[in-house]
Amino acid sequence: MAKSRKDSGDGELEPPKRGARGLWNGAISFSLIHIPVSLHTASRAHQLDLNLLDKRDFAPVGYQRYNKSTGKVVEWNDVVKGYEYEKGEYVVLTDEDFRRANVEASRTIDIQTFVDRDAIAPYYFDTPYFLVPDKNGERVYSLLREALEQSKKLAVATFVLRSRQHVAALMPVDKIIVLNTLRYSEEIQPHPDVVAATKKTNGSASGRELTMALKLVEEMSEKWKPDVFTDTYREDLLKRIQQKVKAGQTHTLTEPEEEETARPSGGGKVVDLMSLLEKSLAQKGGSSDVAARATKRKHSAARRRSVTRTARRA
């Protein structure tokens, strides 16, 4: 299946084009309205591609599919899916079987209800996708996007992707509709019993502390700029790799260093929270610092990306 997005060569992804074949093609359906759309990946992995090695000779360790009866390697084209209905007896299933199980469900994003935008807790959100209108669907697509925008609602829908039914939230983002799959309630762990989250502090200073904390939050607030934040650990790891290559330590197994364990002194240390809040506010120096920090982070990220590209070319 063709990918709907591709790398343009400079690290940026090209947006999906209208009419491009997506991961899934069907329609959004609510009440009597159908909007033909295609589903496109909205996220990508951004991590170092590491290989597994045998530490005895540093040869790559491969993944092999093998026939459990003969022990022979099975080519990917010869692998099919099967359901074991009795011990050792299987029903073979193809993509067409998954489609025929419920043709309507496999072709439709069926909106079940609308909820307030902040009604769904963040830990329910799983994987984002772009919804792109197909030919003759632009007008109704735009209508739904605008209705979601003005009502400040999310549409909660069900649909089938890769042989599994998902529940999803549809939301307006910029000029498009984003579909974000949701975890089912049984996939969410019970909340930890965090007493500190609800415990009220005693003493007359608590009101002043909250006032100072709110002021610090305000001082550090700024417009959301996602491009300012980059995976600096990935770049640090690349530097570590370059150091080992330069030092000729490519086959050296780095052993962990001993770390001193901090031991609390009798009774623990009393934290002067007001003093820490006052010092933090003094360091911020007002809202102009916020913009300066954002600019500094962006420039630092650009320099790191430049260094990384140079290291890769080397």
Image (spheres, helix red, strand yellow):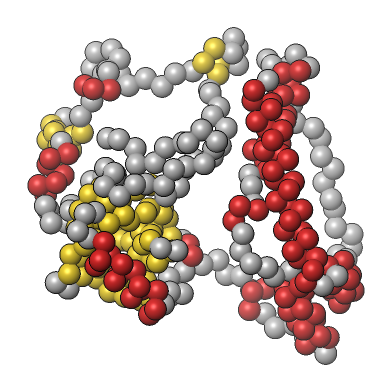
Residue 27 visible in rendering: no
User: In the rendered view of the protein, which quadrant contains the C terminus?
Assistant: top right
| Number of marks in the rendered image | 0
Residue in the image at 15% along x and 37% along y: 93
Residue 56 visible in rendering: yes
Residue 298: x and y in percent read 70, 51
Q: Please tell me which residue lies in front, 232 or 83.
A: 232
Q: Which of the 4 image quarters holds residue 241? A: top right
Q: Please tell me which residue lies in front, 73 or 136.
A: 136
Q: Please tell me which residue lies in front, 232 or 188.
A: 232
Q: Is residue 250 above or below residue 289?
A: above
Which residue in the rendered view is the most extreme toward the top?
57
- Left or right relative to 65: residue 88: left
Residue in the image at 82% along x and 46% along y: 261
- Left or right relative to 214: residue 17: left
Residue 275: x and y in percent read 90, 74
Residue 104: x and y in percent read 13, 56
Q: Which of the 4 image quarters holds residue 287? A: bottom right
Q: Please tell me which residue lies in front, 214 or 37.
A: 37
User: In the rendered view of the protein, which quadrant contains the N terminus?
Assistant: top left
Residue in the image at 46% along x and 74% along y: 118
- Left or right relative to 30: residue 71: right
- Left or right relative to 70: residue 190: right
Residue in the image at 48% along x and 62% along y: 123
Residue 40: x and y in percent read 34, 48
